[in-house]
Amino acid sequence: MSTRLTYPPALLSREEAAAYLAGISTRKLDELQAQGRVIPKALDGRRGYLREDLDEFARSLPDWEGRK
């Protein structure tokens, strides 16, 4: 039985974090982690991503302006 939360979780799973970042693949998220651009937290041998860290990463991306 799963618990239904009425508030957002403190940590996002790998799949949730990838979906949160504009629906990128989990493989791409793994690449960003390997590059040190997205750093998960550790909890009992599992990784979880803080929404604030994902937001900070997204804000650090270059603007689209001028791209074709």
Image (spheres, helix red, strand yellow):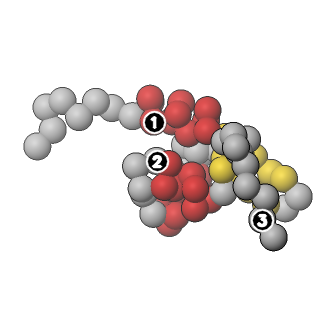
Residue 7 locus on image (x, y percent): 69, 40
Image quadrant for the N terminus?
A: bottom right
Disc assigned to residue 39: none
Disc assigned to residue 58: 1
**Residue at numbered disc 3:** 2
**Residue at numbered disc 2:** 21
The amino acid sitting under disc 2 is: Leu
User: At 50% across and 66% down in the image, what residue appears?
Assistant: 27
Note whether 6 is above or below 47 in the view shown.
Answer: above
Helix, strand or loop at label 1? It is helix
C-alpha distance separating marks 2 and 3 = 25 Å
User: At 52% across and 64% down in the image, what residue appears?
Assistant: 26
The amino acid sitting under disc 3 is: Ser
- Picture quadrant where residue 13 is located: bottom right
Note whether 52 is above or below 38 in the view shown.
Answer: above
Image marks 2 and 1: residues in contact by CB distance under 8 Å? yes
Image quadrant for the C terminus?
A: top left
